Image (cartoon, rainbow, N blue to C red):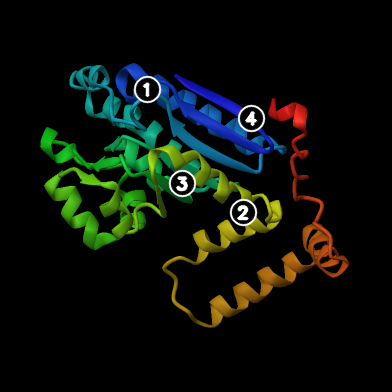
Amino acid sequence: MIQTEFAQGIALIWLNRPDTRNAMNDVFIAELTDAFSAAIEDEAVRAIVLAGRGKAFCAGADLNWLKKARAMTPEQAREDSIGLARLLRLIHDSPKPTVARVHGPAFAGGMGLVAACDIAVASHNAKFCLSEAKLGLLPAMISPFVMKAMGVSHARRYFLTAEVFDAAEAYRIGFVHELAPPEELDATVNAILGHLVLGSPNALTECKNLILDLAGKPIDDAIAEDTAARLARVRASDDAQEGIDAFFAKRPPRWVPPPPPAATPEDDD
């Protein structure tokens, strides 16, 4: 159900149930959790991309899984649901940058996966929907992440209406960061990855922690002390010393991957 490819410091995690439009079930969630955990723990991985095979990013919950859930007790239903909440938290809190590559439908739980990522790039053909209310349900586990991504005002509309909206609207409300024609989606994602690998791995983790820790807090003396202490600590890190030395030496820091070899006439044949 889940496949991972590794290349040049990037872990590309594929949702691989194209026959169900990458619909979620308990096995899918467990495998995706394992894939993200492995990518996070792999020191060679600099960034993680989440993508869907076939014609959809993720259509939400598998219908057979929903049918099975109807017979569960409340306690069984809670245990069945908590796995998705833990997966979304794992993605959201990943110390490594995460990028959602979105095409086709991203419905319900699929929107939760997008919202949990740091950066979302959507094809012009992407469609979004928080469809739960039309099934008598609610977007419970995904709600903290979706509300942070689109804001409370837009969540009020789309949680309640359960209407489908397109990529242009997702971009307008801030749910996705970048749009691309379908044929340019990979190039657009790769351009963002090209920027990410220029940053120090330690600095990117520290930046993520800074955002997670400070979001929503009042700007006061405690924040000033906190941020000053963070900078003092990071300035003493090996990455900071290397970055400053490289800047003055006019050379790339050691974490920047080497450029690919230049093409030769034989390569072009």
Badge 3 is on which residue? 117
Residue appearing at x 31%, y 55% in the figure: 147
N-terminal of the two: label 2 or label 4? 4
Distance from Cα at disc 1 to Cα at disc 2 = 35 Å
Residue 170 or 155: which is nearer the viewer?
A: 170
Badge 4 is on which residue? 6
Say what amino acid the circle numbered 2 marks.
His
Say what amino acid the circle numbered 1 marks.
Asp
How many residues crowd around disc 2 within 10 Å: few (fewer than 14), some, or many (20 or more)?
A: few
Q: Quadrant of residue 52?
A: top left
**Which one is closest to the eye, mark 1 or mark 2?**
2
Residue 62 on image: x %, y %: 28, 22
Q: Is residue 31 above or below residue 247?
A: above
Residue appearing at x 64%, y 30% in the figure: 6
N-terminal of the two: label 3 or label 2? 3
Distance from Cα at disc 3 to Cα at disc 2 = 16 Å
* Mark 2 secondary-structure assignment: helix
Distance from Cα at disc 2 to Cα at disc 4 = 18 Å
* Mark 1 secondary-structure assignment: helix
Residue appearing at x 12%, y 48% in the figure: 161
Q: Is residue 8 above or below residue 158?
A: above
Badge 1 is on which residue? 26
Badge 2 is on which residue? 195
